[in-house]
Amino acid sequence: MNNDIEQVLYTQTQIDNRMDEIANQLTEKYQGQCPLIVSVMTGAVVFTVEMIKRLKFKLNLDYVDVSSYADGTQSAGKVKLVQDLSSNIDGRPVIIMEDIIDTGHTLKYLADLLKGRGAKSIEICALLDKPDRREVDVEADYVGFKVPNKFIVGYGLDYRGLYRNLPYIGILKRSVYEN
Ligand code: 5GP
Ligand code: MG
Ligand code: MG
């Protein structure tokens, strides 16, 4: 698996340290509230699990599944809700946890959807941000790391379902997906 990685961008230790920082910010902000954490399947699962263990306030956890990437490495631009929340969010603070913001279509769609359902507030917490590729105006309130315009895997991020279990964030070799 490691042979398929061109370059490690962030090691497990670097990720851990950055998550501690973000968790402290969130803990300060949400103390005394009970937000709903909305994890975007499947890419954000590792990030979400590692993050919520660090949060020192009451929270609920739910998830949605959306699809924008058909199968490969290019965005389809269209977002589809594959699995909805099971919680009512009316009047509740919501924190969306996402693996990476690329074109921004996914988060724009989700934020608009949840706003329309009467969330009290919505914040976005993304492990990674690829700002070069943005097509719609959406920004995360908390970002782990900025990444270059390359195809990233690891720490929950996949290529065709693989590499999610890598404990670091890296660039996938082009030879893996180009032939
Ligand atoms: P957006 O809607 O912002 O273009 O895309 C968001 C989704 O596309 C992410 O949640 C992620 O699933 C996928 N994605 C975007 N860039 C990458 C990348 O570099 N690597 C992987 N594995 N997925 C990506
Ligand atoms: Mg995703
Ligand atoms: Mg994916």
Image: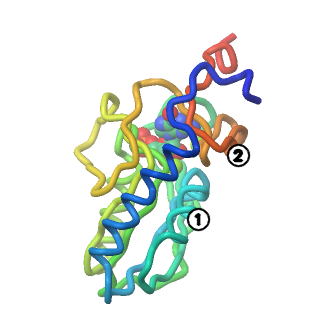
Q: Is residue 50 above or below residue 99?
A: below
Q: Is residue 68 visible?
A: no
Name which quarter of the figure residue 13 lies in: top right
- Which image quarter holds the N terminus? top right
Task: Please tell me how crowded label 1 is: few (under 14), some (14-19), or many (20+) other residues with Cα within 10 Å.
Answer: few
- Residue at figure coordinates x 37%, y 46% from the top left: 105
Q: Secondary structure at mark 1?
A: helix
- Can you name the residue that lies furthest to the left here? 137
Q: From what the image shows, is residue 49 above or below residue 121?
A: above
Q: Position of residue 116 (x, y in %)?
A: 29, 73
Q: CA distance from mark 1 to mark 2?
A: 13 Å
What residue is disc 1 on? 49
Task: Specify whether 69 is left or right of 175.
Answer: left
Q: Residue at 74% across / 21% down in the picture?
A: 3
Q: Is residue 59 shown to the viewer in this render?
A: yes
Query: What residue sits right under mark 2 in the picture?
Result: 165
The residue lying toward the viewer, choosing from 90 and 124, is: 124
Give the colour scheme shown. Answer: rainbow
Question: Which of the two labelled residues, at mark 1 and mark 2, occupies the earlier sequence position?
Answer: 1
Q: Quadrant of residue 168?
A: top right
